[in-house]
Amino acid sequence: MRVGSVNLGTRIVDDLNEGGTMVWVVFGGAVPGRMFIPEDEAQYTVLPPTSLQD
């Protein structure tokens, strides 16, 4: 996941609206999650579930 010029690494999408314009991403730790909207200019690369490790 990337927002602007900042690479946020691999994150998990917790929820999104029907049109996919609002995405709730889980960060873990002290910051449990954040909602991203089109104005945030976030870029997502969807990985297959098998690419995540336990």
Image (cartoon, rainbow, N blue to C red):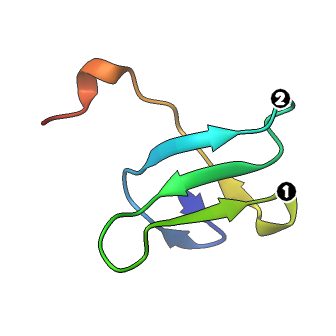
Q: Is residue 1 visible?
A: no
Q: Is residue 22 left or right of residue 29?
A: right
Label annotation for residue 14: none
Q: Mark 1 to mark 2: distance in Å?
A: 14 Å
Q: In the displayed structure, would residue 40 be above or below residue 12?
A: below
Choose top left, top right, bottom left or bottom right for residue 9.
bottom left
Q: Amino acid at mark 2?
A: Glu
Q: Amino acid at mark 1?
A: Pro
The residue beneath circle 1 is 38
Of callouts 1 and 2, the N-terminal one: 2
Q: Residue at x 34, y 22 (%)?
A: 49
Secondary structure under badge 1?
helix
For label 2, the crowd category at 10 Å Cα-Cα, with few meaning under 14, some 14 to 19 and many 20 or more, is: few
The residue beneath circle 2 is 18
For label 1, the crowd category at 10 Å Cα-Cα, with few meaning under 14, some 14 to 19 and many 20 or more, is: few
Q: Is residue 1 left or right of residue 38?
A: left
Q: Residue at x 29, y 73 (%)?
A: 29
In the current view of this chain or complex, which residue is farthest to the bottom? 30
Q: In the displayed structure, would residue 32 be above or below residue 50?
A: below
Q: Position of residue 23 (x, y in %)?
A: 69, 48
Q: Position of residue 22 (x, y in %)?
A: 78, 49
Q: Is residue 32 visible?
A: yes
Comparing 4 with 38, the one in front is 38
Q: In the displayed structure, would residue 14 be above or below residue 32?
A: above
Q: Is residue 37 left or right of residue 52?
A: right
Secondary structure under badge 2?
loop
In the current view of this chain or complex, which residue is farthest to the left? 54
